[in-house]
Amino acid sequence: MSVRQIRITVEYDGTGLAGWQRQANAPTVQEHLEAALSKLLDHPASLTGASRTDAGVHALGQVACFSTERSIPLHGVRRGLNSLLPPAIAVTDAREVDADFHPRFSAQGKHYRYLLLARPDRSALQATRTWHRPQPLDVAAMTAAAAAFPGERDFAALRAAGCTARTTMRRIDEVTLSGPEPGVLAVDVRGNAFLRNMVRILVGTLVDVGEGRLDPAQMPEILASLDRTRAGQTAPPQGLYLMAVRYAADV
């Protein structure tokens, strides 16, 4: 029987999970998925993911792949996994792909969204889904600052201290701000790839602009400095969502 490679799209609420990647002493998305896959397929299964999201980060469009010789139909893979997974994790799509497809290395781009709750009072319902900022945000200044990020350059100024990437050259295609609902400000970031905590540092820098601690005119200088200490704070994980991973085959 031939080996099938199956690509799944995964949605998850990262609250209470230690991120995507399997860890020895904490529950992760990968661990739950591999346990469910092993039961469904009746053989050990391992997953390769497109993005190693951190603890508390959510996803609507995480992508992962596994291999099997089992002939379970794709709708059976999706439904079977969803019957075995905890409520915080769901598989929204399953499809067969070529053997040379790799969730990470075949990706041509990623889309992240960060949600800010910009209102005086905290939220009981959105505490684990947004970053609460009680003071007013200058959205016009944040939008002006966001215009400095698109382009291909060295983004070392937006890299976390523990980042192990071999190069800090990345391309940001777009940074946009919008208000999807009253009191909520969404920052959408699209690019070819991202450094560790890069989107969260970018958002934290924009918040520092919006609250008057940084000037939009400083953005080019901050990026050119390649100095993490020149950029803004790191936004907390709970407001970050991996919205989608883009592949050539999907166009």
Image (cartoon, rainbow, N blue to C red):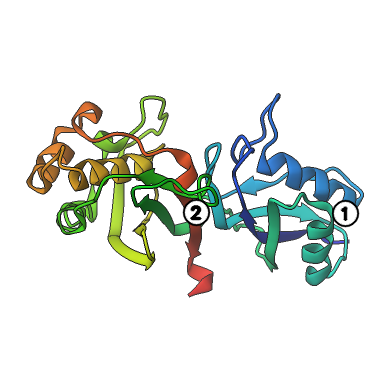
Q: Position of residue 151 (x, y in %)?
A: 22, 55
Residue 216 is marked as none
Q: Position of residue 231 (x, y in %)?
A: 22, 35
Contact flag, marks 1 and 2 (Cβ < 8 Å)? no
Q: Position of residue 29 (x, y in %)?
A: 67, 43
Residue located beneath label 1 in the image = 40
Sequence order check, earlier mark of 1 and 2: 1
How much space separates mark 1 and mark 2, taking CA atoms?
Answer: 26 Å
What type is the residue that disc 1 sits on? Leu
x 50%, y 61%: residue: 244
- Using residue 133 as the reference point, say whether residue 107 is left or right of it: right
Farthest residue toward the left? 217
What type is the residue that disc 2 sits on? Leu
Mark 2 closeness class: few <14, some 14–19, many ≥20 residues within 10 Å: many
Secondary structure under the numbered disc 1 in the rendered image: helix
Residue located beneath label 2 in the image = 242
Q: Position of residue 60 (x, y in %)?
A: 56, 59
* Residue 169 visible in the shown view: no
x 53%, y 48%: residue: 124
Q: Relative to 175, does residue 154 appear above or below in the rendering? A: above
| Front residue (pair 202, 151) | 202
x 43%, y 45%: residue: 122
- Using residue 129 as the reference point, say whether residue 232 is left or right of it: left
